[in-house]
Image: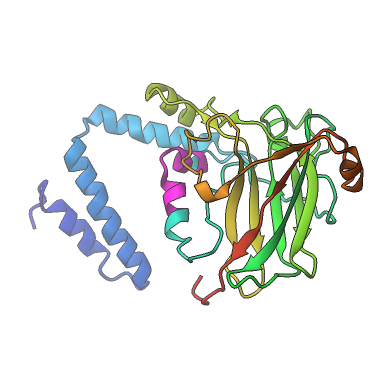
Amino acid sequence: MELTEHTTTAAVQASFAATPDDRLRTVMTALTAHLHAFVRDVRPTHEEWEQAIEFLTEVGHTCTDTRQEFVLLSDVLGVSALVETINGDEAGATENTVLGPFHATVSPPRALGDTIDMLGEGTPCVVTGRVLGVDGTPLGAAVIDVWQCDKNGFYDVQQPDRQPAGNGRGLFHTAADGRYWFRTVVPSHYPVPDDGPVGQLLHATARHPYRPAHIHFIAEAPGHRPVTTHVFVADSPYIDGDTVFAVRDSLIRVFAESDDAVRAESLGTTAPFRHVEFDIVLAESDGTR
């Protein structure tokens, strides 16, 4: 076959025909079709294609043990959000949203009611909720992994000389009635890391790098699909313009203010403080994912 602009795609797809894994063959065949269609549509010059390769190379070079620039690239292009939406199709279950680039270290195990704040700065906050099945059954001993930034918008891995390792992180197990609770501080809105190639892309396209304030969760329980999600602070800046397209209306909560000193003392914190209730609903696993 003579390779031309219109025959090259079929030739590359045919090269994958003997791929033993059916799913891999399907993926590579479709990837070839869409990638080649993109190239024919955009018609990049040699210099532009070299620039694209250099950009991806720099994305790889920017990745470290505590920074995942490829995840960040996926996030700002909306791909992470789309993958989560596609894989979170169970009616009644908590919506999936992006993992983000800062789930880069293991969260320390903590007891219910512990604080994940090791700095003692910022507005105190109490987070409570339940982990439930879609039918409302409490899921005792479910595992909840949480992580968040500090009051200034930084994660522990971004400030290893200021924040203790594990600050803003915790691994909890729900009680028999599915309940969990922990203490923390109200997180801030913040910019995604914009000092690397992804930041250069945002700047070149006149996009801001900001995310609204949120707390990350991964929840899982035996016999149920795990969920990766957030709870978003309702009055946060950028709640309507998240640069990684992760906000879902169902995940926005009011972090209610309270001056009740007695209640604050019963919760192991001080007034004034803020409180949010966030239930997480897990769909039953069908054994395929």
Judge from the rendering whether residue 86 lies leftward or rightward of residue 17; answer left or right: right
Residue 183: give x, y in percent of width and height.
Answer: 81, 45
> Residue 198: within the magenta?
no
Residue 150: give x, y in percent of width and height.
Answer: 72, 33
Residue sitting at x 72%, y 30% = 151
Of 126 and 18, the residue lying toward us: 126
Residue sitting at x 45%, y 63% = 89
> Over which residues does the magenta segment extend?
71-83
Residue 43: give x, y in percent of width and height.
Answer: 18, 35
Task: Write down the quadrant of residue 148 in the picture.
Answer: top right
Residue 278: give x, y in percent of width and height.
Answer: 67, 52
Judge from the rendering whether residue 16 lies leftward or rightward of residue 176; answer left or right: left
> Residue 73: within the magenta?
yes
Whether residue 275 can be seen here: yes
- Chief SS of the magenta region: helix
Whether residue 166 can be seen here: no
Quick one: quadrant of the N terminus? bottom left
Q: Is residue 30 above or below residue 141?
A: above
- In this picture the colour scheme is rainbow
Task: Write down the quadrant of residue 166 in the picture.
Answer: top right
Of 84 and 15, the residue lying toward us: 84
Total marks placed: 0
